[in-house]
């Protein structure tokens, strides 16, 4: 049994686990909204006191921004507007303040910009006027980077004149930022996979819980779908949940797949031997097909063709 001498180490272990869980569940417990965040890129921006470079921070100065779309926030305080009378400037105006808690922006900075998505249609642009964070958490292992940002109206009405350096989008499936082009590619991938599955679903039998034609369940087809579903089965990657994983097929084989990994599948040039599971005899039988058969004459051949297209789309399948 451990003695009291181990207590400091135990407490340290508890604290480390606490910080790890904060990072792990940060997107699970996220009751607030997404925002578009303009983060100042210090490394590629210039500041010159002699030229009064910050007189007009957002237009005259050479301050460059990185855009972070779909930035998640843990908390967004209500935007409170108050009437303020400034006779020497614009007269009576409606000033606004708010605050937001972010955890995905690594280095928030004063003068960063924040914009809201729909249904908010006011077009308001806010700037960061102050920030608070537990510095000891930033310098912990694992590091926890949560920031409470104070917001106020920004002195601009549009962002198209800002100097933009990079454009990122928060990918909730991987819980990280990716480039805008990578996000567009990912959208195209999802659309292509859904198009294939919308045809595959026609061959799904809910009674047997597998994909089949008549009494034949094509082995390679069901295994391709299993590999695909496993690829998107972790946490927020569950974006194809409306398409069923063939548990019935696994049950027939005592949950032992015929292929150990995706690379062992036989979808290669020159191979004609594939397999089907006969639901009547409960036996695996050989089936002749080729990846060159792009005009299927039977439903079984069509199933194999669809599974091959899914391999090409989702796994960047090559013939070598």
Image (spheres, rainbow, N blue to C red):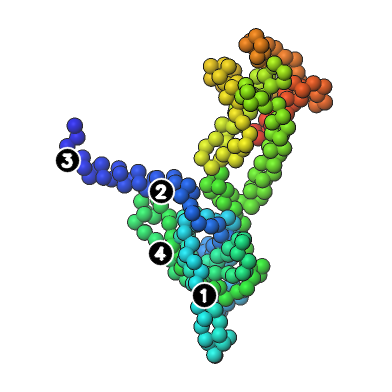
Callout 4: helix, strand or loop? strand
Tag 3–tag 4 contact (CB < 8 Å): no
**142 vs 117: above or below:** above
Q: Where is mark 2, residue-wise?
A: 22
Residue lying farthest to the front in this orientation: 207
Callout 3: helix, strand or loop? helix
Q: Where is mark 3, residue-wise?
A: 4
Disc 1 versus disc 3: nearer the observer: 1
User: Sequence order check: which comes first, mark 3 or mark 4?
Assistant: 3
The residue at the point 69 percent across, 38 percent down is 194
Q: Residues within 10 Å of mark 1 (few under 14, many from 20)?
A: few
Callout 2: helix, strand or loop? helix
- x%, y% of residue 293? 80, 23
User: Sequence order check: which comes first, mark 2 or mark 4?
Assistant: 2
Disc 2 versus disc 4: nearer the observer: 2
Disc 1 versus disc 4: nearer the observer: 1
> Alpha carbon of mark 3 to alpha carbon of mark 4: how far?
37 Å
Q: Where is mark 4, residue-wise?
A: 132
Callout 1: helix, strand or loop? strand
């Amino acid at each position: 049994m451990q003695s009291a001498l181990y207590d400091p180490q135990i407490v340290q272990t508890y604290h480390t686990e606490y910080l790890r869980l904060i990072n792990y569940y940060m997107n699970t417990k996220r009751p607030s909204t997404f925002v578009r965040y303009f983060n100042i890129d210090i490394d590629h921006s210039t500041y010159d006191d002699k030229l009064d470079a910050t007189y007009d921070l957002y237009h005259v100065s050479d301050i460059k921004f990185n855009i972070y779309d779909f930035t998640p926030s843990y908390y967004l305080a209500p935007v409170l507007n108050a009437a303020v009378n400034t006779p020497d400037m614009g007269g009576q105006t409606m000033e606004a303040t708010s605050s937001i808690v972010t955890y995905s922006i690594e280095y928030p900075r004063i003068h960063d910009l924040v914009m809201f998505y729909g249904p908010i249609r006011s077009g308001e642009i806010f700037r960061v006027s102050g920030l608070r964070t537990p510095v000891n958490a930033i310098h912990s292992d694992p590091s926890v980077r949560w920031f409470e940002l104070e917001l106020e109206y920004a002195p601009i009405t549009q962002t198209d004149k800002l100097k933009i350096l990079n454009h990122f989008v928060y990918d909730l499936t991987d819980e990280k930022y990716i480039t805008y082009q990578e996000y567009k590619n990912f959208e195209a991938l999802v659309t292509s996979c859904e198009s294939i599955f919308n045809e595959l679903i026609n061959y799904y039998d809910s009674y047997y819980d597998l994909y089949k034609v008549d009494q034949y369940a094509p082995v390679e087809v069901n295994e391709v779908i299993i590999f695909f579903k496993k690829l998107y089965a972790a946490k927020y990657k569950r974006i194809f949940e409306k398409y069923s994983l063939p548990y019935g097929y696994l049950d027939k084989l005592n949950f032992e797949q015929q292929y150990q990994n995706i690379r062992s599948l036989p979808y290669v040039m020159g191979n004609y031997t594939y397999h089907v599971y006969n639901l009547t005899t409960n036996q695996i039988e050989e089936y002749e097909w080729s990846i060159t058969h792009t005009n299927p004459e039977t439903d079984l051949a069509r199933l194999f063709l669809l599974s091959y297209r899914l391999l090409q789309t989702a796994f960047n399948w090559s013939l070598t």
